[in-house]
Amino acid sequence: MANLCEKTASQLLELYQKKECSPKEALVSVSGSIKAKDKDGRKIHAYIDSENVTPKFREKAFSSGRLSGIPVAIKDNICVEGQEVTCASKILKNFVAPYNATVIEKLLDAGAVIFGRTNMDEFAFGSSCETSCYGPTRNPRDPERVPGGSSGGSAASVADHTAIAALGSDTGGSIRQPASFCGTVGIKPTYGRGSRYGLIAFASSLDQIGPITKDVRDNALILSVLAGYDPKDSTSANVPVPDYLRALENQNLSGMKIGYPVEIQKDLTPDAAKLMQGAMKVLEKKGAVIDRSVTLPHTRYAVNVYYIVAPSEASSNLARFDGVRFGFREGSATNLLDLYEKTRGEGFGAEAKRRIILGTYSLSSGYYDAYYLRAMKVRTLIKNDFDKAFKEVDAIMMPTAPSGAFKVGEKTKDPLEMYLSDIYTISANLAGIPAISIPGARSAGENLPLGLQFLGKPFAEETLYKIAHAYEQESGLHKTLGNVR
Ligand code: GLN
């Protein structure tokens, strides 16, 4: 039998049921794998802390539930009661979460084991996991390369079999882009599909939590547990949660129309063009009809809009970190203003400061109309484009990222270039719609995983899982990449 850490959640559940192994053995296998890989010289560094299983969680974990005894790694911006949570920022060092995020409560209720804190870009600002105050995470497929970001630690742990599954958060692509770079599956659910309570906010109108997994089945299983209304989060929607596993029963896509937008077809990198050619063939083979005439004319403004809206919300959300209430405080301050300046000056890294300055500027009274308000208007146009497109098609396909994982250090000098790596992921957050990334192909030459993205109507995660699963089963990439053995 392969090591238990190399199993998927669904495989482990089956083994538990047949009494072929126990949750404790799986847990030991996962921690053993982390320890072994910590020492193997590749310096993947997916975890900030991997010793987090408390007895309290254990008790609940081994009872019955849909995820009974499944270890799930958690991004360092989701609160787990009694555990440090820092958003990989010096400003939150030593801050201990006073309560569980709702997603943590849900995982615990389903019997999962909360296991380890995964590395991320500071406050989820980034696409490469290089802005963490703990140092970068590297891509297990090629340690010279980044794992993507900001949920880079979560994606790397799953790809490296140091986690069975992990939670990430996605504001502009932070689940899907690292999933793409590491060859895993990641979904950003519809805005409001689940609770953000206990997720340390980056941009409240864009953030969602979602699972990163080895295959589509695990993803559907875990989202079935996470999704749903939460009275503690007024932006969560009271919409019934289907059992997403049901979407996987039938892999026939006939009758389904998938749009490949005109704007996306232009300016593709050779790798992305090949990915899309191959993807169309696979989907057509499964019975889907590809519509190459749908248009999303305003998506070309998505990056511009996002880099006004997201930093604006971030500057407001990060105002609370002032040295008074949370985490780090610069001790030498002589008065209140000095305390703010010194704490924030020392506590935040360069990218966080850049976002705060950008956001504060676009929200300031003289510039609000010119920047923030205007960006919000274009955001509506982007959403309208999708509404219109979804009158014609059931889902939309595009690459997750322009290329495979880039090299560590390659884009750190030019923030604008880094921002452009999210060109295909951002519009789903602006429109509030669900989007999934699955392994779609491998790059020529370097053989790196390339993510294929499907976007759906609000609350149509089921459709996305159906298409993604059919694609996965036909392409077999989850197996050839070694995610499922
Ligand atoms: N890379 C994007 C950014 O830096 C998205 C990050 C995210 O989704 N959290 O803002």
Image (tube, helix red, strand yellow):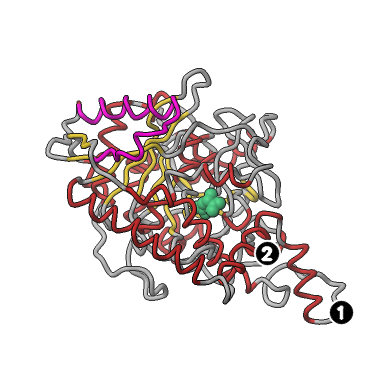
Mark 1 Cα-neighbour bin, 10 Å: few <14, some 14–19, many ≥20: few
Q: Amino acid at mark 1?
A: Thr
201 over 392 or under it: above or below? below
Magenta-colored stretch includes residue 270: yes
CB under 8 Å between callouts 1 and 2? no
Q: What residue is at 87 percent from the left and 79 percent from the top?
A: 334
Q: Which mark is residue 278?
A: none
SS under mark 2: helix
Please indicate whether residue 248 sits to the left or right of residue 23 in the image.
left
Q: Position of residue 389 (x, y in %)?
A: 24, 49
The residue indicated by pointer 1 is: 334
**Which residues are the magenta region?**
259-284
* Foreground: disc 1 or disc 2: 1
Quadrant of image for the C terminus = top left
The part of the image, by quadrant, that contains residue 376 is bottom left
Residue 274 point in image, percent of width and height: 38, 24
**Residue type pointed to by label 2:** Leu
339 to 148, vertically: above or below = below
Quarter of the image for the N terminus: give it: top left
- Inspect this view and state whether residue 353 appears: yes
The label number, if any, that marks residue 92 in the structure image = 2
**Quadrant in which residue 263 is drawn:** top left
Distance between the Cα atoms at labels 1 and 2?
21 Å
Q: Is residue 96 magenta?
A: no
Magenta region, mostly helix, strand or loop? helix
Residue 74 in sight from this viewpoint: no
Helix, strand or loop for disc 1: loop
How busy is the neighbourhood of tag 2: few (under 14 within 10 Å), some, or many (20 plus)? many
